[in-house]
Amino acid sequence: MSFSTLPAGLNLLPPNDLLRTTLHNEVHARPSARVRLPALITYVAVLNAGISQEAECEHLRRLPGQQALALDSLQNNFLRLRWDGYTVKWERHTEFTRYSIVQALSEGALLGASKPDLLSALVVSPGWLSSIPGATVAAIQMALLQGDLTDERTLMAQAQHWFGGGTVVASQLGHGHSWAATQFRIGPDGFERMLVIAPPGTTETRAGRISQRLLELETYRLMALRGLPVAKTLAPMLAQAEQALAEITARLEHKSASDQELLDTLVSLAARVERATAEHIYRFSATRAYDTLVGQRLVELREKAIPGTQTLGEFMQRRLSPAIATVAATAQRLASLSERVARTSALLRTRVDIATEVQNQQLLEKLTRGQDLQLRLQSTVEGLSIAAISYYVVSLLLYVGKALKGMGVPLNPEMAAGASIPLVLWAVWRTTKRIHEKLHAGH
């Protein structure tokens, strides 16, 4: 039987895992944009801490014709809304949400223009843009247009003129299939500007991939840098904690403080270090992850240098790498401090354990000496008890002898009592010993 003749509905596989379809379709969850040149992309990325999907959905409903937008439409954390002549894309990530408005670029913003006004032609209202829920972390106006890439000098002059003069960072992308230029500066309108120049005939999918990589590159760069202020804030605390730990270790070495005092100080220091770790470990881990993504996007751009100009990757890494190194060093410093506090705690615990063992040994020796004294005292008391009991027994025998003598029995009571003393002593001693043997046998 060939595959084409298999009965309809025949299941050739075991039951699907519950996540199979979801994980398989994840690769299609955020499809690349298709951008027709010339185009303007207005991009805003906002931190979404404390912002729910319901609030973002409510904001999207304020767009024309979207009053009935269902919350379920946002369940995949991606949504593209289309109108005649423009699209709005919404993407929610772990820490931030991205909004992209793609529209046609006005003729006044093509090559030859100088600092063109891009906001006046925005298809969404400025009020809708400014009321996006969240705090802005990146805002970019990207112009994608066509141009002749063969004359590099003329093209670079046009790009600098488009930005209004000043230093421009630019690269050839894909080893020459397009150009990207920016100044990495926030303008008076709050937006950073990027210019992408592609030759005529550039496909919409290629333009979409270029724009997506550049926008992600800048967003991930800014998100990676969010760990730098945290690292700088932690530096004084780490210096103080390291100094405090050194002092505790010195006092522990020279036995210049009580164990309880050292323990209290060490517990306080450990609490400070663990609190800092708990509060900032996620930020440091996120910085490493975002930095990795920045490196991946730079590789995907396949930059080629333009003579006399820094590439985007060179400019970015020259400034990003020291910041990432600072964050990594601070994270390592915090982890090392935590380990050193743990080792010092172990040393103090060992000293306390040894002191406790010595105290226990001394107490045991005192108990042993007490038991020896008790045994001696007990032996002394038992000896006295034997003498006392024997005395009373002999006295009783003396009274018995006197009674018998009074009854006419020829007997000297005193002689009889004196003669019975050895026998009485032996009998009392033997009886006491048997009682002791029974008691020890019972234990």
Image: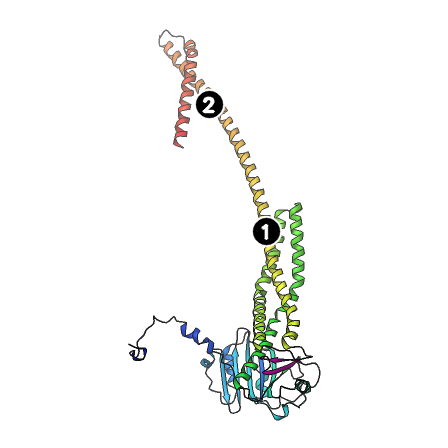
Q: Mark 1 or mark 2, which is nearer to you?
A: 1
In the rendered structure, the answer to whether residue 161 lies left or right of residue 130 reads right
Location of residue 102 with respect to 430 vertically, above or below: below
Give the main secondary structure of the magenta stretch: strand
What crowding class fits label 1: few (fewer than 14 Cα within 10 Å), some (14-19), or many (20 or more)?
some
Location of residue 94 with respect to 196 vertically, above or below: above
Residue 225 position by quadrant:
bottom right
In the rendered structure, the answer to whether residue 18 lies left or right of residue 329 reads left
Is residue 75 visible from the viewing direction of this image?
no
Type of amino acid at the residue the image marks with label 2: Ser
Q: Which mark is residue 345?
A: 1
Say which element carries label 2: helix
What crowding class fits label 2: few (fewer than 14 Cα within 10 Å), some (14-19), or many (20 or more)?
some
Q: CA distance from mark 1 to mark 2?
A: 58 Å
Q: Which mark is residue 412?
A: none
Residue 431 position by quadrant:
top left
